[in-house]
Amino acid sequence: MEIYDLSSKFAGQDEFIKRVRLYIMLRWYLLLVLSVSGFITAKYANFSPQQIKQIVGLVIIGTLSNIIFELAVRVKKILLRFNIYVAIAALLIITDIAIYSAGIYISGGSNDRAIIFFVLPIVITGGLFSRLYIYFTSFLCVLFYLVTTVLSEIRDTERLPTAAIFIQSIFYSSVLILVAFLTDYLYTIKNNKEIERAQTELVSLASHQLRTPATAVKGFLSFILDGELGKLNVRQRDFIQQAYNENDIELKLIDNILNVARVDLNTLYFEPKIADIGQLVHDVIDEYSGGAKQMGQTLTYRGSSNLMAFFDPQLMRMVIDNLISNASKYSSEGGRISVSVGSDNRSVKISVEDNGVGISNTEQKQLFKRFTRVGRARQGKTPGSGLGLYLAKELIKLHNGRISVVSYPNEGSIFTITLPRKAKTYG
Amino acid sequence: MAKILVVEDYASLLKIYQMTLSIGGHKVELAQNGQEAYDKATASDYDLIILDMLLPKMSGLDFLREFKPKKRTPKVKVMCISNVPNPDMVSQALALGARNFLAKPLLTPKELSEEVDEILDKKK
C-alpha cells in the first residue's frame, strides 16, 4: 500500500519517470561527494586496508544501484507490462536500504550514537513531512541496524572510526531526505498547478459555450421589448422584461466565472486608460436606481464627476457593479446604500456603504477568497456565485489598487476601493 | 444605406444581426464560415464586414490575412466581434486591418446598430 501511495500522487507514468530520473541524477552527485570525502577521510585517518575495502564496497553498492535505476527507467517498456510504479519504488527502497545499512554496518560504534546520528534524523524528518517512503525505509533501517549490531557484537569485526563515518552518514542521509522531499514537493506543486490549469481551461470553455446562447436570448428579447415585433400589452411587457432581467443576471454570472478563469489563466483583456471614474460610478448607479426603488431602497451618490483615474472602464464597471449589487442584495427593504467618490493628489477612493446585514470579523477574513459565501448567502437565501468579491479583489490588484471592508453584523458594511490616479504610479 | 456582410457561425446570433441591420435600413448578406465569407467578400463589394473571430473552415484572423482589407479598393471596413477578446487576438486583428473590435455579449441590437452607424459614418 505504501508503495502505491508513493506513486498515486503522480498524474501519469511519465511524471513519475521524470521524478525518478531527477532522483537518480542527484544520487550520482551524492555518490561522488561520498566517495571523495570517504577516501580523503580514509587517507588522513590512516585506515586499514579492511576499512578502505568497506568504503569501496559502499561506493560500489551506490554505483550499482544507480545503474540499476538507469536501466529500470530505460527499459520502462518492459517494466510497463508489470507495474512500473511498484517496480521502481521497490528498487529505490531496496537499494537505499542497502546503502543506509552498509553505512551503519561500517560505522559500527555504540548503538546509541549510531541511532542518534544516523537513524533518528531519517525517522524524524520522515515524520515531519509524512513521507511514507522515508518512514518505510527508516523502519527497515532500524530493523537492519539492530540485526547487524547484534551480529557484529557476536563476530566483533574490525570497524571504521565512528566519528569519521558518522559525519558522512549524517550528511548523506539528510541530503537524501531533503532531496526526496524536495523532488516530491516540486512535482506535487507542478502537478497540482497543471490540474488547476486544466480545470480553469474547462471552466473557460464551458462559459463561452454558455454565453453565446444566453447572448442570443438577450438579443431576441431586446427585439420584442423594443417593439420591433408589434406593440406589447402591459402584462406581456412585464413578463418579457422579467425574462430580460433574469437573462441579464445569468450573463453577469457567466461573465464573473469567465473572468475569474481569465484572471487565473492570465488571459484577461486589460486595457487601462485615463478616464472619468466619477462618471463611471454615476452610470452604474443610474442603472441600479430603478431596481433599488422597486425594493424600497435608497441609492445615493456623493462626489463630483470629472475625477480622472487610470483604469480599464469595462473591468472597473464590473467591480462597481458587483459592489452595488451586493450592497442591494444584503440590505433589506427600505435599506440605504450610499456610494461616494473622493480623491487626493495620488489616489481616488470609491466607497460603497450599506446598512444591511453586515459581516462578522471571522467572515471578513474569508470574504475575498474564491467561492466564499457568508451568513445569509451561505444559507442559500441570497443568490450569488461567491466569485464577485474575489474577482473584484483580483481586478483591483491588476489596477495596482486596494480593496478593503469595514463591517459590523446587523449594522452594515463599507467597501472601499483605492485606485492610483496616474498612469505612472501604475506598477 | 450600406451593404453589409455579416459573418457568424451561430445561427441565432446571425438572425439577430440580420434583423437589427435590416431594421437600420441596410442591405445585409450572411456567411456562416470563414471560407464562405471570403468567397462572398471577394466576389462583391461591401461597405462593411462584421466578422466573428471563431469560425469554422477559416478563422476570423485567417480571413483578415487572406482578404487584406487595407489593400482593397473600393475601401471596405471590417468590424470584428468576439466572445473571446484576448489582447493578442485584438492586436493581431487591428494590425491586419480591422477597424474595430467588439466583445459580443455587450451587444444588444441597439448597441450593435449604434456601433455600425458610427463606423460607417467615419471617414477614410
Image: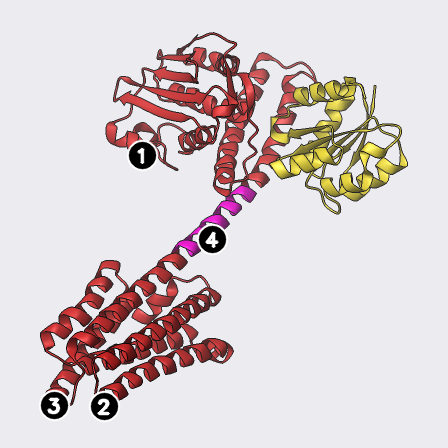
Chain colours: A red, B yellow
**Pointer 2 or 4: first along the chain:** 2
- Determine whether the residue tagged by mark 1 lies in a helix, strand or loop: helix
Establish if A259 lies above or below A336: below
Residue A37: quadrant of the picture: bottom left
Percent across and percent down for residue B4 are 81, 27
Disc sitting over residue A50 in the figure: 2
State which quarter of the image contains the N terminus of chain B.
Answer: top right
Question: Which residue is drawn at the image coordinates 65% and 16% (left, top)?
Answer: A226
Residue A101 is situated, as x and y percent measured from the top left of the image, at: 23, 80
The subunit carrying tag 4 is A
Residues drawn in magenta: A189-206
Position of residue A83 relative to residue A243, above or below, is below
Q: Amino acid at mark 3?
A: Asp
Is residue A195 rendered magenta in the image?
A: yes
Return the x and y of residue A195 as percentages of the image width and height: 45, 53
The amino acid at mark 1 is Gln
- Kind of residue at disc 4: Glu
